[in-house]
């Protein structure tokens, strides 16, 4: 594959992935405002955009065997926590943007947890275990196997968690 086509596939993947999240958030807002029919449309188009993103990943040959995917995901999460959010936080602090500092700090802390979950997933794989994951709906923290009373990252109560099958 040519370098230019590879760059274009990466750009398309990034754009489609951003659209997936943006449309899901738009759907939540439409639901809050009492427009379930619009929310349904946003969710449907979000799923369509996710198909586009998956197709781009396949063409880029990014998806490998599960052990490799876990290893590469661990490396990415570790780097994002240290390099990405590690550099975003001081900028937000220097600008006096406390909300951004909080969001970046939560994300950094959760990314570090994600890295540990990827490591533990290999253990689950080898033991043929099917764990339950509890996700904090406030900051994104993920607990492996037990529902915490409160989120260790943002302090949200247990009723703010949901499970992912």
Image (cartoon, grey):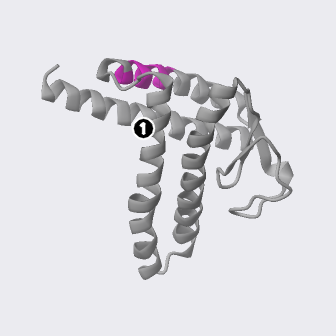
SS for callout 1: helix
Is 147 a magenta residue?
A: no
Magenta segment: 48-57
Label count reads: 1
Task: Decide whether the magenta segment is chiefly helix, strand or loop.
Answer: helix
Q: Residues within 10 Å of mark 1 (few under 14, many from 20)?
A: some
Residue at 73% x, 27% y is 129
Near-viewer residue (70 or 8): 70
Q: Picture coordinates of residue 142 (x, y %)?
A: 68, 47
Residue at 69% x, 27% y is 127
The residue lying furthest to the front in this view is 127
Near-viewer residue (13 or 86): 86
User: Which quadrant: the C terminus?
Assistant: top right
The reply, left or right, for residue 97 in relation to residue 138 is left
Near-viewer residue (64 or 49): 64
- List the residue tagged with mark 1: 72
Q: Quadrant of residue 84?
A: bottom left
The reply, left or right, for residue 47 in relation to residue 9 is right
User: Which quadrant: the N terminus?
Assistant: top left
Q: Is residue 81 above or below residue 93?
A: above
């Amino acid at each position: 594959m040519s370098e230019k086509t590879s760059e274009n596939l990466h750009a398309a993947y990034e754009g489609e992935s951003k659209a997936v999240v943006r449309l899901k958030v738009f759907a939540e807002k439409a639901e809050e405002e009492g427009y379930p029919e619009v929310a349904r449309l946003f969710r449907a188009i979000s799923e369509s955009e996710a198909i586009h993103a998956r197709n781009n990943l396949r063409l880029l040959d990014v998806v490998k065997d599960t052990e490799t995917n876990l290893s590469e995901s661990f490396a990415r999460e570790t780097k994002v926590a240290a390099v990405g959010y590690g550099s975003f936080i001081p900028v937000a602090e220097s600008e006096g943007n406390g909300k951004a500092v909080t969001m970046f700090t939560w994300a950094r802390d959760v990314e570090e947890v994600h890295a540990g979950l990827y490591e533990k997933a290999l253990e689950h794989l080898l033991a043929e275990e099917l764990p339950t994951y509890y996700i904090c709906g406030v900051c994104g923290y993920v607990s492996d196997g037990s529902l915490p009373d409160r989120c260790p990252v943002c302090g949200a109560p247990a009723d703010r968690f949901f499970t992912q099958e």
